[in-house]
Every structure is written in structure tokens, then in C-alpha cells.
Image: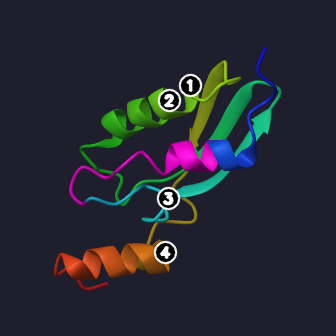
Amino acid sequence: MAGPPTDAQIWDALRTVTDPEYPLSIVDLGMVYGARVEDTVVHVTMTFTSIGCPAIDMLLHDVREALTAVPGVTAVAIDVVWDPPWTKECISDRGRRVLAMYGVVC
């Protein structure tokens, strides 16, 4: 039996979830505000770049799929928050470099 998932495993899994518009993870975009493991359940707090984002359902599905693939995870609880609101300042340094390669200025 696998032990409880580690924080590193959880964050690595979240980094595999990419934005549909850019080849960038939701972690590098700053959309994930937090992730913690309680027993075998992963609790994620995240936001989106806008309330009207057409990819919300797809990204929630992708987060659940990525995290349930981690050994020891039995369930995923996602809390979508709008406060604090996402801004371009949330983007990681790596994310800024990747976006700049695609001509996106942030």
C-alpha cells in the first residue's frame, strides 16, 4: 500500500495541468493558491483568470485527473475562490519567461 502523497507529488501533478491557450501550467500562471493533503484527500484552492473563463470545467476536470493519478490519493476537493482576484502579478518568473517566448508581454 502506498503511503500518503507528498506535497512534492501534489505540486508536480498540478504542474502537468496546462492552460488551453498557452503551454504553461496553472501553477506557473498563479491560478493555484494552495494545495494540502488530509489523509488521502487533496484539497486545492484555486482561481481562474476571469469569472467568464470558458475553460473552467475543463481545467477542474484536468486537476482532478492529475491528482487522482498520484499514488495514495483517493479524492480531490477543489475550492474555487475569486478573492483575491487573479492578476498578471500572480504569474511565476518561469511563466513570464515562457510567455515572453510566445510574444506575450506581462
Element type at marker 4? loop
Could you tell me which secondary element the residue under label 3 belongs to? loop
Marks 4 and 3, Cα distance to the nearest angstrom? 8 Å
| Residue at the front extreme, as displayed | 1
Label located before the other in sequence (4 or 2): 2
Find disc 4 in the rendering and name its residue: 92
Q: Which residue is mark 1?
A: 68
Q: Are marks 2 and 1 in contact (CB under 8 Å)?
A: yes
Q: CB of mark 4 within 8 Å of CB of mark 2? A: no
Tell me where residue 34 appears, x and y as whole percent. Answer: 66, 53
Q: Nearer the viewer, residue 19 or 88?
A: 19
Residue behind mark 3: 27
Total residue callouts: 4
Give the x, y percent position of residue 45: 61, 47
- Say if 2 sits above or below 52 in the image: above
Task: Please name the residue that numbered disc 2 is placed on.
Answer: 64
Q: Earlier in the sequence, mark 2 or mark 3?
A: 3
Q: Which residues are magenta?
A: 10-22
Q: Residue at x 66, y 18 (%)?
A: 74
As drawn, the residue found furthest toward the left would be: 103
Amino acid residing under circle 4: Ser
Q: Residue at x 40, y 56 (%)?
A: 25
For the residue pair 89 and 53, the one nearer the viewer reads as: 89
